[in-house]
Image (spheres, coloured by chain):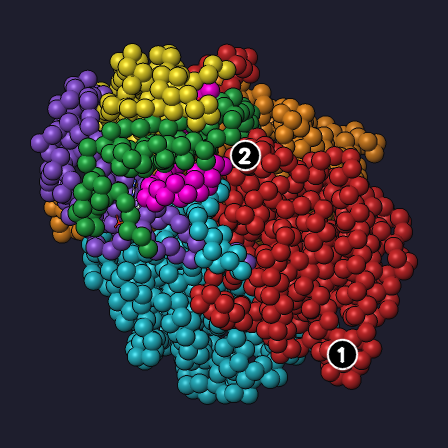
Chain colours: A yellow, B green, C purple, D red, E orange, F cyan
Amino acid sequence: MKLVIGIVRPEQANQVLEALHRAEVRGFSMSRVQGHGGEVERVETYRGTTVQMGLSEKVRFEVAVSDGFVDRAVSAICEGGRTGEVGDGKIFVVPLDHAVRIRTGDTDEGAVTPVSR
Amino acid sequence: MKLVIGIVRPEQANQVLEALHRAEVRGFSMSRVQGHGGEVERVETYRGTTVQMGLSEKVRFEVAVSDGFVDRAVSAICEGGRTGEVGDGKIFVVPLDHAVRIRTGDTDEGAVTPVSR
Amino acid sequence: MKLVIGIVRPEQANQVLEALHRAEVRGFSMSRVQGHGGEVERVETYRGTTVQMGLSEKVRFEVAVSDGFVDRAVSAICEGGRTGEVGDGKIFVVPLDHAVRIRTGDTDEGAVTPVSR
Amino acid sequence: MNAGIDTGDTAWMLIATALVLMMTPALGLFYAGLVRSKNTLNTFMMSIAAIAVAAVTWAAVGYSLAFDGGGDLIGGLGNAFMQGVDFAPREGTAIPELVFFAFQATFCIITVALISGAVVERMRFGAFLVFAALWSVLVYAVLAHWAFGGGWLLSGGTLDFAGGVPVEMASGFSALAAAVVVGARKDYGRQALLPHNAVYVLLGAGLLWFGWFGFNGGSGFSTGNNSVLAFTNTLLCPATTLVVWFALDLIRGRKVTAIGAATAIIVGCVLITPAGGYISPGWAMLLGALGAFPSYGIIVWRTRTRVDETLDVLAAHGTAGLFGVLFIGFFAQASWNGVSDGLFYGNASQLLDQFLAVLAAPAYAFVATFVLLKLIGAVMPLRASDREEAMGMDVVQHGEEAYVTGEGAILLLPDDVGKVAVPVADPG
Amino acid sequence: MNAGIDTGDTAWMLIATALVLMMTPALGLFYAGLVRSKNTLNTFMMSIAAIAVAAVTWAAVGYSLAFDGGGDLIGGLGNAFMQGVDFAPREGTAIPELVFFAFQATFCIITVALISGAVVERMRFGAFLVFAALWSVLVYAVLAHWAFGGGWLLSGGTLDFAGGVPVEMASGFSALAAAVVVGARKDYGRQALLPHNAVYVLLGAGLLWFGWFGFNGGSGFSTGNNSVLAFTNTLLCPATTLVVWFALDLIRGRKVTAIGAATAIIVGCVLITPAGGYISPGWAMLLGALGAFPSYGIIVWRTRTRVDETLDVLAAHGTAGLFGVLFIGFFAQASWNGVSDGLFYGNASQLLDQFLAVLAAPAYAFVATFVLLKLIGAVMPLRASDREEAMGMDVVQHGEEAYVTGEGAILLLPDDVGKVAVPVADPG
Amino acid sequence: MNAGIDTGDTAWMLIATALVLMMTPALGLFYAGLVRSKNTLNTFMMSIAAIAVAAVTWAAVGYSLAFDGGGDLIGGLGNAFMQGVDFAPREGTAIPELVFFAFQATFCIITVALISGAVVERMRFGAFLVFAALWSVLVYAVLAHWAFGGGWLLSGGTLDFAGGVPVEMASGFSALAAAVVVGARKDYGRQALLPHNAVYVLLGAGLLWFGWFGFNGGSGFSTGNNSVLAFTNTLLCPATTLVVWFALDLIRGRKVTAIGAATAIIVGCVLITPAGGYISPGWAMLLGALGAFPSYGIIVWRTRTRVDETLDVLAAHGTAGLFGVLFIGFFAQASWNGVSDGLFYGNASQLLDQFLAVLAAPAYAFVATFVLLKLIGAVMPLRASDREEAMGMDVVQHGEEAYVTGEGAILLLPDDVGKVAVPVADPG
Ligand SMILES: Nc1ncnc2c1ncn2[C@@H]1O[C@H](COP(=O)(O)OP(=O)(O)O)[C@@H](O)[C@H]1O
Ligand SMILES: Nc1ncnc2c1ncn2[C@@H]1O[C@H](COP(=O)(O)OP(=O)(O)O)[C@@H](O)[C@H]1O
Ligand SMILES: Nc1ncnc2c1ncn2[C@@H]1O[C@H](COP(=O)(O)OP(=O)(O)O)[C@@H](O)[C@H]1O
C-alpha cells in the first residue's frame, strides 16, 4: 500500500475531487496548506507597508491506496490538478506499512476501501 | 521507527488525547482536515442554493514513535476514536528513517521521547 | 528521495524559510498544526472557566528532496528552528518512492527542483 | 403637531426605541461569540427569533395586559391587537402612545432574548420559539404590569426606573429555571467549552452599552430630569464596574481579562437600570463599584456547580438587577429624583417597597418559567440528542454553518437532486 | 433659532440622517458575509465607494435635479453645487434645508450600494466607480424627482413614503439589468458558491434594521404622525415577515435558516418602506406576512435560472418594494395618514396611481441601467478575467486579503525593493 | 421642563453623547483588525480601558479642570467630583449641565483610546492603565480648557469647533511621543506585520463615521445653525477625502485599497472636526480633498523611518487635525458661521489665532506625554519582553486568546487544579 500526497491549486480542488471519484478512489483527506515553489510572487500593500507574498494557497490531498490503485490515484490527481501554469503542484508517493479502519479494526487492504453507501 | 497518522472525528479528539496519554505517548502533532469516505452526506441550504456537503471535519494526529511503541499508539488511537458508526476514520503507519529533536539535535529514539516536565 | 517533515515554532517559521532559502531548497509546503510535547502548559481563564492549554501552535514544513539534499534540508530546519528552549520541535525523514510535477508530469528528481524564476 | 405632544421628547423617544431594538441583535452577537463555533448561528438566531415572536405577541396581547388599566395583578384587554393605540399622547407623557407602545415592545423583545443565554448549545430551536411566545405574555407582560403598568408593585411604591423587575430579575431568574429544566450540556463540567470569538463579545458589549443609553435614558419617556440623570448614570456606573472588575480579575488571576471586561459592561448597565433616574451620579458610581462583587462572585461560584446556566444570565442580570433595585431603597434621593428618598435619607419605607420587589419578582419568574418549560417539555423535546449536540446546533437545527469554505460542497440543482454524484469544491 | 425651524423635528432628522448613512457600511458587512472570503473586501468596498462617489455627485447635481422645482420629468439646476442650500427651512418642513439635503443624500448613497449585490465577485472595481457616479445622477435623481421632488408620479397622486420607487424598485430592477449585462460568475450554476461568514450577515441585517428606523421614520421630515406611524410599522412589519419566513423555511427545508432570517429582515423593512406612513399597524403586519411570499418565491426560483443576480437584490428590494407600493393602493387609510384612502376604503383611483408607479419605475430603472452599462462596457471591461475571478477580487482589484496571517510575507523596503530575496514570516 | 432647557436640543445632545461613546468600542474594533491576531484582545482592551479609566478621572477632576471658570491655563476645582453639575442649563446652552458633562466625557475617553494605536502589540496593559489615568487629566483636561473651557486659546479667538486641539492634535502628537518612548516592536522594519482582519477595519471605520455625526454635530450643543452645518460637512468632507484617497492609491500602487479607504474615512472626519461649524459645505469639500495629501504622505513616509507609531495616529489625527485647524484661518466665513471670517474673507488675524493653536497644542501634547511616559517608565516596565511579544499580548497580558477552538484545553476544576492530568479537547 502507498500513501499518495497531492498538493494542488485551490481552484483545481474540485476537479481533483471529480477525477478521484471517476477513478473510484472514494476515501481521502484534504487540508489547506501554503506552498512555495516557482510561482511568481504577488505584491500587496497595507497602508505604508508593501509586502511580497512568498507563499500561495494550496490544497493537500492525502490518499491511502492499495498498490493496484496507486497509478489511478496519481493520474487522477494529475489530470484534475493540471492547468499548465507554474504552481500546479506536486504528488508524492510514500510507502505505507499498515492501515487500520478505526470503526472495525480491519487492517490494510480492507481498511482503505470505504463501505459503499 | 514509524510515523503513525491517525484521522478521527473532532468529537473524539479528546478521547484520543486521553488514550495517547494513558499509553504514555507524550509527543504528537494534530491538525484539522476534511475527510471523504463512506459517511452519509448532509444537505445544507443557503438562500436558494441547496448543497450536499461531501466532506466532513476530521482531526489528524501525527505521532512519531519508536518501533516498540507502534502498537500502543495505534490501539490508543483506535480505542479513543471508535464510535462504531461510519466515519470513525483511519490509521496509517508509515516508515520513518530518521527523527531529530531540533532543540538538542538528538536523533532517532532520543528525539521522539519528550523530556518529562 | 525523502520527504522531510519539520515541526517548528511559529515565531521561528521565518528563520526556517530563510535557512531553507540559503540551503537552496526552493520548494516546500507549510501548514499550521497544534503540538503536544514537553512544553509547560499555559493557563487561561474565560469567565468562571479556568483551563490549561495542552497544545501549542506549531508550523509544519513538508519538503520533498532528492537524497543529496536531505542533510542540507534537515540542518537548515534545525538551524532556523532552534531557540534552545523546550518546544523547538522535531524533524522527521520519511522515504519517498515517487514524486510527480503535476504541471509537466516529470517524475522524481525532476519533480522536486522548481523551475528557477 | 398634536396637542400634548412635545417634538423634543418624541424625537428622543424615537431614537431611544431604535437603540433598544438594536440591542437584541447586539446581544445575539455577544452571545454568539461566547459559544463554540458549531453553535454560532443557533445562538444568534435565538435573539432574532425573540424579535419576531415577541413583537407579534406584544402587539396582540402583551402590551394590553401590561399597560391597559391599573389592575393589581394584570392589565386588561382594552388595547389588545393595538386597539386605541394611536397618535394621542400616552397619559403622563408628551409622546404619542404609538411610540410608547414601540418602546415598551423592544423591552419585551430583549428580555426574551436574554433568557436564551441559559440554554444555548443544546435547546431545540422549535421549543425555544414556543417558549418565547408564551413567556413574553405569561411572565414578561405580568411583571411589566406590576412594575410599570399600574400593578401592585408600582402602586405600592416600589421604584424601578427602567426594568430591574420585568427585564433584569425576570430574565435572570427565568434563566436559572430554564437551565435547571433543560439540563446541562453533555460535556459541561467534563470538558472546556470556550468562547470561539472574543471580538464578537467585545463588540457586542460595546453595542449593548450604546443601546442602553436609550434603554435607561428613554425610561423617563421624555428629555426631562430623570431621563437626563439616568442617561448620565449609564455612563458613570458601568465605568466604575469596569474598574472594579479589572481589580477583581487582577486579584483572582493576576490578569485583566477581555471576556471579563465585556461582562463588567453588562453588569454595570444592569446595576443602573432600576436606579438610573432615582440616585445621584455619586451614588451611581458607588453602585457600580459595590455591585460588581456579587455578580463576580456568582460567576466564579456557578461554574463549580452542576447548573449549566451557560452564559451567566443569573449573575449578570438577575443578581445585578436585584442589587440595583435594593440600592434604590438605600440611596434614592428626592432632591435628585423629585419622587422619593431612601433609607439613607430617612425614608425606611422605600427600602421595604424595594424588598417586596426582590422577593416577588424572582419568585414569580422562576416558578412560572419552571412550570412553563415543564409543560412545553411534556409536549415536545426541549433539547437535541447528544449526537446532535456533538454535531453542533447550526447544522442540526438550521442546516447551515457559520463559516463555510465551500470545499467539497456539491451543488444540488432542483431538477437533478441526487443525480450530481461527485463532490464539487470552490475554496473561498 | 431660526424662524420656522422646530428643534425637536431637527433633532430627529439629524439622527435619522446619521442612521441612514450607517446603513451603507452595514450593507457592506451584510454583503461581504454573503460572498466567498476571497471577495470579501471587494464586496465591502463597493458600498464604501458608493458613499464616496454618490455623496459628491449628489452635492454637485443630483440633489438639484431631484428637488429643484416641480418639472414633470426632472428638476432644475438651481441648487446645483448646493447653491441656496442653507439654514432656511425646506418648504413644507420645519428643518433646515441643509439637513434635508443630507438626509436625501444618504438615500442616494445606499441605493447605489444596493445594486452592487448583483455584480459582486466579478465586476471590476474601476468600472463600478464609473457606473456608480453616472447611475446616481441618471437613474436615482430622476426617479427621486418623480416620486419625491415634484415629478409626475408625486403630482399625479402616487404615494411613496420612504422610497419604494427611487430606492427599492430602482435598485432591484437595476440590479437585474446589471446582472444581465455583466453576466454570471464563471462557476455559477456549476459549483456551490457559499457565504463565508453568516455572522456578518446577521449582524449586518440587524444594523440595517436599526438604520431603517431612521430611513422610514425620517421620511416624514418631522416627529409628526406619519413619521411616528412609519416608525412603529418598521418594527411590526419586518417582525411578521420573519415569522412567515420561518414558516416557509420549515415547509421547504424542514429547518429555519439564519441566512433566511437575515433576508426576511431586509424584505420586511423594504415592504414597509413605501407604505410606512400611510397604513395602519394592523395592515402593516398583514403586509409583512403577505409580502414574504413573492420575495421568497423569487429567491428560490432565481437560482434555477442562468441569471446570476448574485445577492438577490431583485427579490429582496425590487419585488418587495413593488408589493409595498401596490399595497398602499388597497389599504391606505386617510384616518391614519391624513392624506388618502385606498381601494379597500373606497378610493379606487389610488390603486391606479400606484399601478403607474410599479410600471414606470421598474421599466425606467431596468432600461436606463442596461443602456448605461452597455455604454460603459464599450469603453472599459466590466468584469475581471476568469483567471482573476479564480484568484479572487480582493487580491486582483485591491492588492489585499481580508484575513492575512503574515506567513511568508516579505517586507519590501522602499530602498531595496526586490533586493530582499528571502521569504520572511511572522505568523499572527 | 426646566426653565432654559430646550427639549429638542436636549434630545439631540443625548443621542450625540451616546454616539460618541459608541465610537470608542468602534475604535477598538478598527484597531483590533489592524494588528496581528495574537494581539487582538489586548488592542481592543486598551479602548475599553480608556472608557473605564477616563470616565472616572473625568468625573473626579478632569471636567472641573477643563470647564470650571476662565483661567488662562487651567480651570478650577469648583466642579470636582461633579459638584454643582446638575439639571440647570450649562451657560450658553439650552441643555442640562449633566448632559454637557457626559458629552465632554466621551471626548476625553476616545482621545485616550486613540493614543493606544501608537503602542499596540508591545505596551504592557498595566502601564497603559496608569498612563491613561494621568494623561486624561494632565494633557486632555488642560488642552480642553485651552480650546473649549475658557482658556487662552479660546479667549484669544482660536476657533476649534469639535476638538482639533484637545482631541486630534493632542492624540496625534502624544502618539508620536509614546511611540518614541515605548520604542518599536522587536520585528518592526524587519518583518511584515499585517492586519489580521480587514473586515473589522472597514466596519470599525463605518461605525466611527456614524459616531462622528454626533461628535461634530453635537459640538454646537444644540440643533442650531453651526451644529447643522457641522453635521452636513461631516458627510461631505470625508466623502471627498475618500475620492482623493482612491486616486492617490491608484497612482501609487495602481490599486485602490480597502485599508486605505478605511483610513481615508478617519482622515476626512478628522479634517472637518475643527472646521465643521465654521466653513461652508463647498470649502468643506475642498478641505476633504486637500487634506488627504499630507496624511497620505506621512503614512507612506513614516513606515520608512525607525519610528513604529504603529497605527499612524499622527498621520490620521495629528496631521489632519492640524490641517483642519489652519484651514479655518483661511476659509472661515462669518456669513455661514456667524462668528468670524478667515484670511480669504479679509480677516488675517484669524489665521494668526489658528497658528498659535497649531504651535502650542502639539508642543504641549508631545512634551507632556514624553515626560509622563518617562516617569511611568521609571516606576514600572512600559513594554513586554521580546519573548512575551513573540507569544502575543493576548495570552501574556490577558490570559486569553481571541479565537479559541478548545482543542487540547484541560478544564481545571477549582478543587482539583493540577490533578486533571490529561488533555481534554472539544473542537468547536
Ligand atoms: N519539494 C517540494 N516539497 C513539498 N512541496 C513542494 C515542493 N515543491 C513544490 N511544492 C509544492 O508545490 C507547489 C507548486 O510548486 P511550483 O514549483 O510552484 O510549481 P510547479 O510544480 O508547477 O513547478 C508549491 O506551492 C508547493 O506547495
Ligand atoms: N483511503 C483513505 N485515505 C486517506 N484518508 C481516508 C481514506 N479513507 C478514509 N479516510 C478518512 O477517514 C474518514 C472516515 O472514513 P469513512 O470511510 O467515512 O469511515 P469508516 O472509516 O468508518 O469506514 C474519512 O472522512 C477520511 O478523512
Ligand atoms: N513524537 C512526536 N510526534 C510528532 N510530533 C511531535 C512528537 N514529539 C514532539 N512533537 C512536536 O514537537 C513539538 C515540540 O516538542 P517538545 O517535546 O515540546 O519540545 P522539544 O522537541 O524541544 O523537546 C511538539 O509541540 C509537537 O508538535
The answer to whether the beta carbon of the residue marked 1 is less than 8 Å from any atom of ligand 3 is no
Task: Name which quarter of the figure residue D54 lies in.
Answer: top right
Relative image position of residue E256 (x, y in whole percent): 63, 32
Crowding near pointer 1: few (<14 within 10 Å), some, many (20+)? many
Disc 2 is attached to a residue of which chain? Answer: D
Amino acid of disc 2 = Met
On screen, residue E85 above or below D187: below
Instruction: Read off the residue under disc 1.
Output: D342
Crowding near pointer 2: few (<14 within 10 Å), some, many (20+)? some
- Magenta part of the chain: B10-38
Relative image position of residue E97 (x, y in whole percent): 57, 55
On screen, residue E394 above or below D290: above
Rendered image: mark on residue E63 = none
Q: State which tag comes first along the sequence, 2 or 1.
A: 1
Instruction: Read off the residue under disc 2.
Output: D391
Most distant residue in the left direction: C68
Left or right of D60? Residue F212 is left
Mark 2 and mark 1 residues within 8 Å of each other at the beta carbon: no
Q: Are marks 2 and 1 on the same chain?
A: yes
Kindly identify the residue that appears in the image at 59 percent across and 42 percent down: D186
Residue E271 seen: no
Relative image position of residue E89 (x, y in whole percent): 61, 57
Q: In the rendered image, which quarter contains the N terminus of chain E? A: bottom right
Amino acid of disc 1 = Gly
| Nearer to us in this view, D81 or A85 | A85
